[in-house]
Amino acid sequence: MITFDLAGATPAEKRRNRDRFIAAVYPEIRLIPSLGDNHTILMPVEAVWGTKYPEPGMIRLSVGFEEPGSLLEIIRRGLE
């Protein structure tokens, strides 16, 4: 499990960067509301926990059984 926070000067910018990252890695990494899968999946913290953890750019990445090099390339592409 990896949790990271995408940069942004405002909460709206952080949300926009989060959404762009999710769009860039989809469909190789899917967005789902629970972490019960053996494939790598994403879960945006704010969307799941709401005001308890109001971090608009924070994403939890649950790493699955994919080949590590391919997964790193997908994540790198998403962060660019």
Image (cartoon, rainbow, N blue to C red):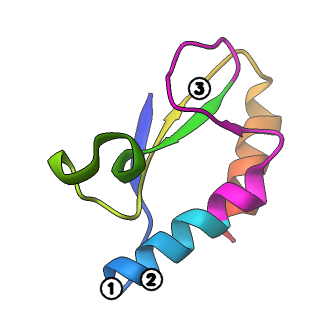
**Contact between labelled residues 1 and 2, with CB atoms less than 8 Å apart:** yes
- Dot 1 amino acid type: Thr
Dot 2 corresponds to which residue?
Answer: 13
Judge whether 46 appears above or below 19 on screen. Answer: above
The tag earlier along the polypeptide, 1 or 3, is 1
**Residue lying at 16% horizontally and 46% vertically, measured from the top left:** 52
Residue 32 belongs to magenta span: yes
- Dot 3 amino acid type: Val
The tag earlier along the polypeptide, 3 or 2, is 2
Number of residues whose C-alpha sits closer than 10 Å to that of mark 2, classed few (under 14), some (14–19) or many (20 or more): some
Label 2 and label 1: CA atoms lie apart by 5 Å
Closer to the eye: label 3 or 2:
2
Q: In the shown orientation, is residue 26 left or right of residue 44?
A: right
Q: In the shown orientation, is residue 3 left or right of residue 34?
A: left
- Dot 2 amino acid type: Glu
Judge whether 14 appears above or below 1 on screen. Answer: below
Q: How many marks?
A: 3
Number of residues whose C-alpha sits closer than 10 Å to that of mark 1, classed few (under 14), some (14–19) or many (20 or more): few
Secondary structure of the residue carrying numbered label 2: helix
Secondary structure of the residue carrying numbered label 1: loop
Q: Nearer the viewer, residue 10 or 76?
A: 10
- Which disc number belongs to residue 63? 3
Dot 1 corresponds to which residue?
Answer: 10
